[in-house]
Image (cartoon, rainbow, N blue to C red):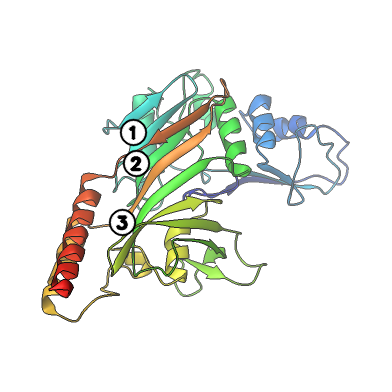
Amino acid sequence: MENEDPQELELYENYRFTVDRGQESMRMDKYLQMRIEGVSRTKIQAAAKASCILVNNKPEKSNYKIKPLDVISILLTTPPRDTEIIPQDIPLNIVYEDNDLLIVDKPAGLVVHPGYGNFEGTLLNALYFYLNVPPSKSSNDLKDYSGPFPYLVHRIDKDTSGLLVVAKTEEAQASLANQFFYHTIERRYTALVWGDFAEDDGTIDGNLARSAADRRVMAVYDNPDVGKHAVTHWHVIERFGYVTLVQCILETGRTHQIRAHMKHIGHPLFNDAAYGGDQILKGTTFSKYKQFVTNCFQTMPRQALHAMILGFEHPTTHKTMHFESPLPDEFERLLNKWRTYANSSINANND
């Protein structure tokens, strides 16, 4: 439960209540426990602590005294669910686990959460199986279940690889969500993008919202009243001439943030079909070069983006946790192709 999505995390309104005109004053957590079937007061308090309960569009604490006609919204990182989640035996690369959380190194191609077109075969289905969670359609189905449960606190796109933290308790979920809310989570991505940069470092600051032309992608808007505030810092790691390897540091974490921000400044991610990076955007007109790029697209048939570094404060021990994921083999092969091409071009120009 937090205010972003990753690049990956988005909040969904799961509940909305308008307080009756004749309602007497009472604590908000008590009121919501009466209104939502099967929810614990502890969970309501954890959601409020993570700023996921809004009263009249403003986050309020669980001890807030409700008033007649207050509009209360409960925002969760998962959309309202009307399909049963079935445990599925899907291989997982779990790089760390304790009683509070686990860290998954997600491969490209794996959807994080069931949704339209992907109701099975997702990371959440795999986590249900791994943690022995019974099939469930709602929290009410799990009222007799007391074991660990996979609470998603952020996501990464289907065709993005890399690190993801998953809480196993409500308390851990609330703590991690709070860190996401206040942007204290460290998230660094490695990306190969089209074009060269005049500088070695930079910052992209632009609100993101669904594109009016294509609702499947995000666009940057100058109007501060449109979309969600988003900030991406970038740093050049290696230059190859027509493409550049960069590290992207998320200050916020909106849907498709890196992909949309990089396109906005004229550097779409390499082979990112949704944002135009699957075309030859820089380079020569020689057929040999075109064939080379085509071979590169085939080497890594998805956007060149990897969630490489993840850091946060542990919910229970409060120790600083830091994880790094090596680039997938396909990403390394892609970079080696560009290194070879760039070096051969330099040598040719020096002859």
Amino acid type assigned to the residue bearing label 2 in the image: Thr
| Label 2 secondary element | loop
Q: Is residue 23 above or below residue 116?
A: above
| Residue 328 drawn at (x, y percent) | 25, 44
On the question of residue 31 being in view, the answer is yes
Label 1 belongs to which residue? Answer: 126
Identify the secondary structure beneath mark 3: loop
How far apart in space, not on screen, are marks 3 and 2 (Cα)? 21 Å
| Residue at x 12%, y 78% (from the top left corner) | 287
Q: Are marks 1 and 2 in contact (CB under 8 Å)?
A: yes
Could you tell me if residue 86 is visible in this image? no
Q: Amino acid at mark 1?
A: Ala
The residue that label 3 is drawn on is 304
Which residue was labeled with disc 2? 122
Q: Note whether 163 is above or below 219 in the view shown.
A: above
Q: Position of residue 165 (x, y in %)?
A: 45, 35
On screen, residue 303 versus residue 344, left or right, reads right
- Image position, residue 4 (x, y; %): 56, 49
Kindly identify the residue that appears in the image at 57 percent across and 65 percent down.
Answer: 206
Q: CA distance from mark 1 to mark 2?
A: 6 Å
